[in-house]
Image (cartoon, coloured by chain):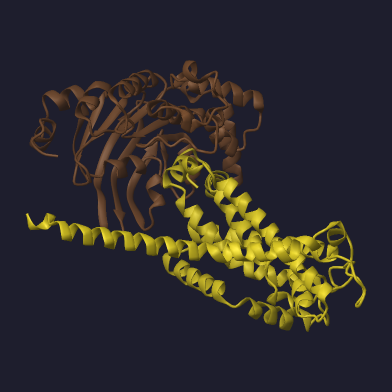
Chain colours: A yellow, B brown
Amino acid sequence: MHLERADNHTWRKIKSALASTIAFVSAILVISPLGLVFFHLLVNGAGSVNWDFLTKLPAPVGAVGGGMANAIVGSLELLAFAGVIGIPIGVLGGVYLAEYGSARINSVLRFLADVLNGVPSITWGVVVYGLVVLRFKGFSAYAGGLALGLIMIPLILRTTEEVVLLVPNGYREAALALGVRRWKTIVHIVMKTASRGIITGILLALARVGGETAPLLFTAFGNRFWNHSLSQPIAALPLQVFTYAISPYDDWHRQAWAGALVLVTGIFCVNVLVRILTRGHAASVV
Amino acid sequence: MATPERSVVEAVERMTEAPSTAEPIPACTFQVKNLSIWYGEKRAIDDVTLDIASNAVTAIIGPSGCGKSTFIRALNRMHELVPKTRVEGTVFLNGEDLYSSTVDPAIVRRRVGMVFQKSNPFPTMSIGENVVIGLRLNGVRDRKFLNERLEKSLRMAALWDEVKEDLHKPGTSLSGGQQQRLCIARALAVEPEVLLMDEPCSALDPIATAKIEELIYELKAKYTIVTVTHNMQQAGRVSDYTAFFYLGRLIEFGPTTKIFTNPTERQTEDYITGRFG
């Protein structure tokens, strides 16, 4: 038959090889930036990550040495404060979207949450600057944490909604048929079934805002010393990296590389944790 | 039952008291009078009047979409989970109107247990936790009481001997038939007055089905059982009374032997002999 002519077959093989080559090259292009980033950070930053860097305050301008201990701790404080705001509101809002509310209200809320997810992060900095920093006349850890928390809310809200919707209806019915009240069913059955997914969403949101610089520029502001009060400016790792990277000093540049390496490693660890949490548990629904 | 708090207390008291079977048994558990149910504009149940006998198995049969499931769900108000449902008529459970405005649906569901078509043990819980979760979430904390009820419920569901060594294992690790018996144990643990079964065997193999049917036969000594089934032979084997539904209407109701051997209505005969449905 003419369909099986030899030349036709060769042409098909060429097309097939071409398509898989293009796909392979695209796949390499997708992951190469990650490799480049890590490679550069390791080459430029690994030498400067040492005990001093992790435990000491920044050295005075002009002096060599010092570290970013205050920025590392500051970032953790900001994340904790952001979590206090972002996690309960995001999770409960997501549960509302999935379990309560009418279809019309929910589609509006969902749309607004997606819009919020698309708002450039510096906008959140400006909003908190106007609402908090100007009103209380000063940069503060509160303001920085609030800005990060506000970014987390729509992220957590959407992931929570998605994983709660994945919980099969049979479990809700089974609990309700035992005479369990609706809110108890939602907390003890539905949210428990979806807990792995909810925690994954929270960790990813924390990893995302952990690297944010723009919202902190005029809220947390940065600090070269330990922060002794949450109503005072506070240092944060990405902010410190930014400040050091645009400085004219070589020593600061090295420290900026080191700071970026620590930051990326931290976020990488969170992502690995997420992988471990979600691995091999496809059977348990979410 | 003036306030929700008080009704919870009453329900817990009821659960911790002696089983309700100690009281004199009325002849019929449910009295359904002129029941009609709408989903939005669609009328799923049309003017059904039916008495369901105590300590007997009543089978609901009929072709798909005839309202069997809606009817059985109306007996513990589970159909209300679907938005825009509307009910007319009355359902009395041992003399109490289930649809009276003072009755709390959660309390109704504690008195009227339910087993579903697809077995659904909670995936995050062990076998033991699955059985007592209904009591725990209804406020029972006494560990000794929970352990006693755990064993008793599993024994009644004919599952104790198979799982007594594995109570800590996940409920989802059991086979399909065992999972369904686990769900029956879970429903029995809150000591309901009635057990509703919505096609409990339709996802099971013949051996697991036989075990559930045997269990149904044993349970009717203590419980009133209403079961929906697609399987005509099953209705014939396990039930004392059979109700035939078609297009939301109750076509015929009577002792199973009469429905299967000498039905009054032509439609019943056609359905049972396999001429349609």
Pick the front one: B85 or B23: B85
Q: Classify residue B103 as left or right of residue B238.
A: right
Q: Residue at x 83, y 58 (%)?
A: A50
> In which image quadrant can residue B215 be found?
top left
Left/right placement of residue B155 relative to residue A18 reads right
Q: Is residue B97 above or below residue B192?
A: below
* The one of A41 and B77 positioned closer to us in this rendering: A41
Q: Residue furthest top?
A: B161
List x then y, in percent, for residue B30: 35, 34
The x, y position of residue A148, in whole percent, is: 69, 69
In the rendering, at what x and y percent does residue A274 appear?
60, 51
Residue at (53, 42) in percent of width and height:
A180
Mark yes or no: residue A90 visible: yes
Picture quadrant where residue A210 is located: bottom right
Q: Is residue A64 shown above or below B185? A: below
Q: Answer left or right for A184 relative to B62.
A: right
Q: How many marks?
A: 0
Coordinates of residue A76 in the picture (x, y in percent): 76, 61
Front residue (pair A52, B45) = A52
- A207 on left or right of B76: right
Q: Looking at the picture, does residue B83 appear above or below residue B97?
A: below
Q: Residue at x 51, y 71 (%)?
A: A114
On the rendered image, what quadrant is the N terminus of chain A found in? bottom left
Q: Nearer the viewer, residue A234 or A171?
A: A234
* Residue B138 in sight in this render: no
| In the rendered image, the vertical position of residue B91 relative to residue A157, given as above or below | above
